[in-house]
Amino acid sequence: MPSEPKSRTGSSATSLGTESPSGGQSGDNTAKSDGLDAFLERWKTVASDVEGTLISAIDRLGDDCPARLREAISYSLLAPGKRLRPILCVFACEAVGGDAHAALGPAAALEMIHCYSLIHDDLPAMDDDELRRGRPTCHIQFDEATAILAGDALQPLAFETILRSPLPPQAAAESCLALAEAAGSEGMVGGQMDDLLAEKRDTATMALDEQKRWLDAIHRRKTGAMIAASVLMGGIAGGATPQQRTALGLYGRAIGIAFQIVDDLLDVESTAENTGKATGKDSVRGKLTFPTVYGIPASREQARQWVSQAIDAVEPFGEAAFPLKRLAQYILDRSN
């Protein structure tokens, strides 16, 4: 599937208003009247439930876990954040008629894998970042070796958390497989490897079509795979039918691409104060990004179109899809 989305008719992404999971909002009274306040309150509730699940997982670590390792895990895993992937998981579960509590184990596992990836991405051998979520990165707060081990520990803890959850055995196994595929060498890790390799290439000499292919291949795996898995794992927890899984798959892929486009735009247009991490580093490192390949206006339009496609994909769920639609709009409008 190419990076550029096809134009779609139907629900308009821009008709949903704008919102922030922290409770801030823009727009008019229509946004308030069509459920925005309830959406924001639901986001906070689910984030709190996920937080409790993360804390319980850390509390289960016994005396054989060194105190410094536990501290580093807790420091990174419980850092302030939007919990986007866990929220997606729970909202997808509810959209197909499932109980939100069934998705909390998979949701927490998604956050653990995401957190491990951030710890490792921030290391000097990777992106060499000193700021994450407005705080010193794990290797700055502790040291490189401790940061590596904290990331290593979060990976098995994620799968343990799924297997300890109340999911039926078949659903737990499917969730573990989905997470392993999304996070592994053909998913997030593979995308990260190609992202690093792209930095070593003279992208200026690459034909535009080749740049687009590389960009799509990198972010379909590096960012998109875990976001799509978040939606799928929520569907699994909720007992989704094959048709519902297909719809969730279309939604997950679309918002995964939109998320990366907006992330690239924020690196160009925003500040460290707004994003909680260093900005402007992609161009310095010679990374392939949507703004460098497509330009800023075209990238912004692509993000709008992908969000519109995501909203269209979950229309068959009716009112139950409202949180997923709102979340898609949030991805488009986010400023951090």
Image (cartoon, rainbow, N blue to C red):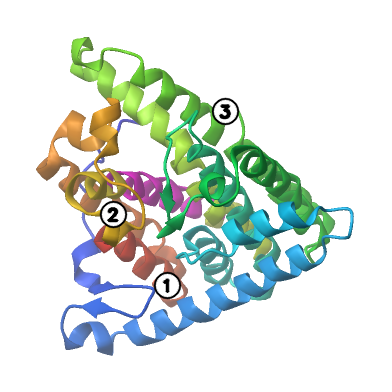
Residue hosting label 2? 272
Is the residue 154 above or below the residue 197 in the image?
Answer: below
- SS label for mark 1: helix
Q: Does residue 99 appear to the left or right of 200 in the view shown?
A: right
Residue hosting label 1? 323
Placement of the C terminus among the 4 image quadrants: bottom left
- SS label for mark 3: loop
Taking depth in this image into account, of 251 and 155 the one nearest to the observer is 155
Q: Look at the image and tell me whether residue 239 can be seen.
A: no
- Disc 1 crowd rating (10 Å Cα; few below 14, some 14-19, many 20+) is many
Q: Does residue 327 appear to the left or right of 97 in the view shown?
A: left
Q: Main secondary structure of the magenta part?
A: helix
Residue 181 in percent (x, y) is at 63, 36
Please state the extent of the stretch shown in magenta in the rendering: 245-261
Residue hosting label 3? 186
Residue 102 in percent (x, y) is at 70, 69
Q: Does residue 320 appear to the left or right of 109 in the view shown?
A: left
Residue 151 in percent (x, y) is at 64, 44
Q: Residue at x 39, y 56 (%)?
A: 313
- SS label for mark 2: helix
Query: What amino acid type should be assigned to the residue bearing mark 2?
Result: Ala
